[in-house]
Image: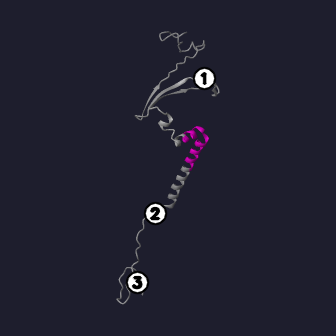
């Protein structure tokens, strides 16, 4: 005789119905595809960063020299500037001249940035002074643009518009 699960036996001689065994609920693990995706993105980022660093390191002798100096301790002030406790350095930046095809013309550039830096190794301080360089340029005045609303530099602010 068959019984429904969860009901009491009709007859006491029959065996009682066993209830199904409940398994403990396991915590849901994070999806393996998400873990693989994160790991893949990390590896791609590491590969790109390593390629960029290698390109800069092997492509520039200046960067290689800086790394060598850093590894040998030449960035320490005592080795770089023996016998000095302070140093003053002037940085000059210059502009370039371009022709009408946006090509750099080989001329003596003009200084457009002046910076003075005073390094005090004993006090571990650096003081910087940046000097503003303003260049005024006056374009030549021709007969064609004297009839416009522009004023010639020699006319001043009080002059009238030419007719």
**Residue 73 location in percent, x, y?**
51, 41
Does dot 1 land on a helix, a strand or a loop?
loop
Q: Is residue 94 above or below residue 144?
A: below
Q: Which residue is mark 1?
A: 108
* Comes first in the chain, label 2 or label 1: 2
Would you place residue 2 above or below residue 100 in this image? Answer: below
Quarter of the image for residue 94 reads top right
Which mark lies nearer to you, 1 or 3? Answer: 1
Find the magenta span and give its range.
47-68
Residue beneath the point at 38% across and 87% down:
15
The answer to if 53 sits in the magenta stretch is yes
**Residue for badge 2:** 29
- Classify mark 2: helix, strand or loop: loop
In which quarter of the view is residue 6 placed? bottom left
Give me the residue at 40% from left, 83% from top: 3
Whole-angstrom CA distance, mark 2 to mark 1, is 68 Å
Is 86 on the left-hand or right-hand side of 104?
Answer: left
Alpha-carbon neighbours of circle 3 within 10 Å: few (<14), some, or many (≥20)? few
Image position of 59 with respect to 29: above or below: above
Percent across and percent down for residue 86 are 45, 31
Q: CA distance from mark 3 to mark 2?
A: 38 Å
| Residue with the most extreme front position | 83
Residue 3's tag is: 3
The colour scheme applied to this rendered structure is: one colour
> Are the residues tagged 1 and 3 within 8 Å (C-beta)?
no
């Amino acid at each position: 005789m068959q019984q429904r699960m969860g009901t009491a036996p009709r007859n006491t001689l029959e065996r009682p119905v066993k209830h199904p065994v409940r398994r403990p609920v396991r915590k849901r693990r994070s999806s393996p595809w998400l873990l693989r995706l994160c790991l893949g993105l990390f590896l791609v980022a590491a590969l790109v960063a390593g390629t960029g660093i290698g390109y800069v390191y092997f492509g520039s002798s200046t960067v290689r020299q800086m790394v060598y100096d850093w590894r040998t301790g030449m960035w320490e002030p005592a080795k770089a500037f023996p016998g000095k406790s302070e140093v003053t350095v002037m940085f000059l930046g210059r502009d370039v001249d371009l022709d009408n095809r946006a090509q750099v013309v080989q001329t003596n550039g003009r200084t457009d940035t002046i910076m003075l830096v005073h390094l005090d190794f004993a006090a571990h301080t650096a003081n910087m002074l940046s000097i503003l360089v303003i260049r005024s340029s006056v374009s030549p005045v021709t007969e064609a643009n004297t009839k416009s609303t522009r004023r010639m530099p020699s006319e001043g602010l009080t002059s009238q518009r030419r007719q």
